[in-house]
Image (cartoon, coloured by chain):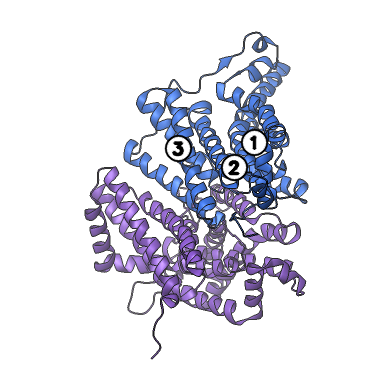
Amino acid sequence: MKKIEFNDIAPAFYSVLSIVFALITGAVILIFIGKNPLLYFGQLFFQGMFSPLGLVESIIKMAPLLIISAGLLACFSAGLWNIGVEGQFLIGAVLAGWSAPTLASLLPYPIYLLSVAALGAMGGMFWILLPAVLKARYDMNEIITTMMMNWVAINLVTWLVKGPINDPTSVPAQTALIPMEHRLSMIPFTSIHIGLIVGIICLFIMHYVIRKTTLGYEFRVLLSNKRAAFHSGMNVARITIWGLLISGGFAGLAGVSDVLAIKGLFQGDWNPAYGMTAIPLVFLARFNGWAVVPLAFFFSFLSVGGEFVARDQGVPIFFVHILEGLTLLFFAASEYIEKRRAF
Amino acid sequence: MSSLMDMALIGAVMASTLRGTTPILLGALGETFVERSGLLNLGLEGMMVAGAFASFLVGFKLDSLMLGFVAAAAVGMILGLLFGFMTITLRVNQIVVGLGITIFAHASCSFLHRVIFGNQFPIMFTAGQTHEVPLLSKIPLIGQPLFNQHWLLYLTFLSVPVLYFIMYKTSLGLRIQAVGETPWAADSSGVNVLKTRYIAILFGGIMGGLAGAFMSLGDLAFFVPNMIMGRGYIAIVVVMLGKWDPLKVFLGALLFGFSMSLTSALQVAGVKVSPDFILMTPYLVVIATLLIFARSTNLPAALCVPYERGQK
C-alpha cells in the first residue's frame, strides 16, 4: 500500500487550515462585540448539522453554489476573473421568472424545463459577452468590466420587474407566480429539488472538461503562460471567450434553478449575492470539482446556520460573509507557506 | 423665467459633478501611486466602504467631524498595511488578497452597522457643511457651485498638481516609478523596493479611507452599507484611463463625476425616465469609455509581480 505523503494532502490541509483560522478570527470578533463564540458556533453547528431541518436546508442551498462553481472552474482555471456572477445570475433568474409562466402553459413539462434552462443560461452568457469580447480583443481587464455589468444588471432587473414584465395583479414589483406543478421536481422521497443533482453533474462535467479535453488543456496553458499559448498557435481570443461564456452560462443557469425551485417568481430587490460565496469556495477547492462539493456544503451550512442563530443570539447574518472574506485572505496567505516549502 | 431655471440647473449640475468627482478622484489618486509602484489594489472598494463607516461611526458617536475623518484615514491605512503585508512581504496573489479585503471590509461594515445601530440609519446633522471661499463665491453663475463646497473637496482638487509634482519631480515619485517598472534595477541602485511599495500602499489606503469619509460625512450625512456602489472599481478604471498620470486621472474622474451628476440632473430636469434606468448610466459610461480610450494600455511592467531579491 502506498504511504500517504504530506505533499499529497497538502492542498486540502491548507484549505482546511484557512477555514479554521477564519473561524478563530471570527470568534475573536464575536468576543469583541460581547458575544460568546462557543455559544454561537455551538448553536450554529448543532442546528446546521444535527437538526433535520438545518441539514435539508443546507443541502438545498448547495444547488446554486455548485452550478456557479462549475462555471467558475472553467474561467478560473484559465486565469480569467469573472467577478460578475451576481449579475449573470440575476439575468438568468429574471429571464426564468418572465418566461416560465408562459412557456409552462405551451410546452410539455420536460421541454418547458429545458427551454427555460437554456434561456437562462443564454442570458448569463449574453451578460458576459461584452466583457469577454473586450478581454479577447483588447485585453481589457475583465474584473472591472464584469463588475460594472453587475451594477447594470442590478438596476436593469429592478426596472424590468417594475415595468415591462411586472405582474399587474400583485402589489410588490415581481413577475407572475409559477404554479407549484410547474416548479422543479423533487428528488424522490426528499424535499430537495433536482437542482442539486444538476449542480453535481455540471460540476463533474466541468472537472473532466478541464482535465481531459483539448479546451481544458488550452485553459490550463493560458493560465500558466499566455505567451506560450499564443506562440504554440492556440487561438487565445477564442479560448478566452469560451472560458468566460461558460462561467456566465452556468451563473445564469443557477438563477433559473433558484427561481423555478425556491422562489417561484422574480422579485426586484432579490439578490442572494452568491458570488461572494462561490469565488472563495472555488479557490479553496483549488479548481478541483470533487473538492467543491464538501466546501459548498460547508459554506451553505454556515449561511443556513448563521440565519438560525442570527435570530436567537443577535449576531447579524453578515457575520457569515465576514468569515468568507477571512477565509479568502487566509487562503491567500497559505500560498506563502506553500512556496517556502517548495524551496 | 425659463432661462433662470436653466441657469439653476447648470449650477446644480456643476456642483454635483464636483461632489461626485471627489470620492472617485481621492481613491484614484491614491491608486495611481499604488499601481505605479507595481501593486494592483482591488481592495480599494473595501477600503472606501470601511472609511465611510469608520468616519460616520466615530464622527457620530464622538460628535466630532474631525475625528471622523482621522478615523477613516486610520482604517484605510490599516487595510493598506494588511494589503501591503500580504502582497509585499508574503508575496501572495494580489487579486485574491484584494477581493478578500473587499468582501471582508464590506461584510464587517454591514455587520458592525447592524450591531451598533440596529435597523436605524441615523443622520449626523452637523455633517456635510460647506465653506464659502471669500470673493470667489460671489462670482455670478459659477461662484456658488464651485466655491461653496466641503473643505475636503477643495483639498482633493488642490492635491492634483501637488501629487503631479511629487510623481514627476521628486525623488520619492521617481523611486515609486522605478520600483514599478524595473524593481531589480531600482534595488541595485540603492532604492529600498519593499519600503517604497509600503509607502505607496499606505498612501493609497489613506486616500481610499478619506474617499469613503467624503461620501458619508462630506457629501451626505449618513451611512448605508451599499453607498459606495462600485466607486472603488470606477476609481481603478480612471487610473487605467489616465495612464497613471495624476493630471489625466483628474480628467477621467471629472468625466465620471459628470456622468453621476447627470443621473440626478435628469431627474431634476423632469426627464421621464425611470430612476433605475438612469442609475445604470455611470456603469455603462465606464464600459463605453474603456472601449474608446483604453485600447492601448501601458501597464507598469512589474504590476502584480511581487519582488524578491535574486529573482527576476
Q: Residue A79, position in %: x, y?
A: 61, 64
> What residue does disc 1 label?
B172
Alpha carbon separation for disc pair 3 and 2:
20 Å
Marks 1,2: beta carbons within 8 A: yes
Q: Secondary structure at mark 2?
A: helix
Residue underneath mark 3: B75
Q: Residue at x 58, y 44 (%)?
A: B197
- The chain painted blue is B
Whether residue A278 appears in this view of the structure is: no
Q: Which chain is purple?
A: A
Which percent across, then down, holds residue A174? 49, 52
Q: Nearer the viewer, residue B241 or A130?
A: B241
Using the image as rendered, state which of residue A269 and residue B252 is in the foreground.
Answer: B252
Left or right of B245 in this view: B47: left
Above or below, A171 against A120 in this view is above
Within-10-Å neighbours for mark 1: few <14, some 14–19, many 20+: some
Figure quadrant of the C terminus of chain B: bottom right
Residue at (66% x, 80% y) in the render: A214
